Amino acid sequence: MARVLTEKHGGERRRIGVAVARFNEIVTERMLDGALETLAAHGVRDEDITVTWVPGAFELPLACKWLADHGCDAVVMLGAVIRGGTDHYEYVCGGVTDGALRVQLESGVPIGFGVLTCATMELALARAGGSHGNKGADAASAALAMTNLQEQLRSEVR
């Protein structure tokens, strides 16, 4: 019979890094609040959380790499990219997504991806604690779930 590993979100004994983009701060601050509430609700102590602010979404992957390199068990990436009238949106969204994937695969440290890519500020705010939930909280939950999955897999192999 196949072994089924269950999704767990416990955060006890976890060191969590949170990288937050300052651009569109009205959105990212709300996402950060949701992420911190979620981490606390799952037992992550304040002293085990490192929050770092970066200028914009494009800088997030490098900040996540630095957090991973400095011993974080998981990283939460928070940003908001709002579509404008130029191609800049496409380049930033692609760069952030590709960068997050590379950091995650190269470091082995899970990243909870909480970067909103929205057409309008109203849509972003709806996803930052509004009518569509808080994607910062969701990203924190995903980071914890992946950290716990990694621990389960390590114990299964031994």
Image (cartoon, rainbow, N blue to C red):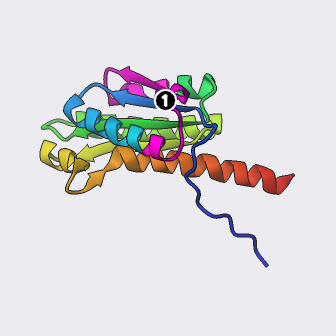
In this view, 153 is above or below 32 = below
Q: Is residue 24 visible?
A: no
- Please state which amino acid type lies under the numbered disc 1: Asp
Q: Is residue 64 left or right of residue 131?
A: right
Q: Is residue 44 left or right of residue 81?
A: right
- Residue drawn 55% across and 34% down? 103
x then y, percent, for residue 65: 54, 27
| Chain part drawn in magenta | 38-64
Secondary element at image label 1? helix
Q: Is residue 51 left or right of residue 71?
A: left
Q: Is residue 107 visible?
A: yes
The residue at the far right in this view is 158
Q: Quadrant of the N terminus?
A: bottom right
Q: Is residue 35 magenta?
A: no
x then y, percent, for residue 33: 32, 37
Q: Is residue 48 magenta?
A: yes
- Residue drawn 57% across and 39% down? 104
Pick the front one: 54 or 36: 36
Label 1 CA crowd tier, 10 Å (few <14, some 14–19, many 20+):
few
Q: Which residue is mark 1?
A: 46
x then y, percent, for residue 37: 39, 41
Pick the front one: 127 or 60: 127
x then y, percent, for residue 123: 17, 50
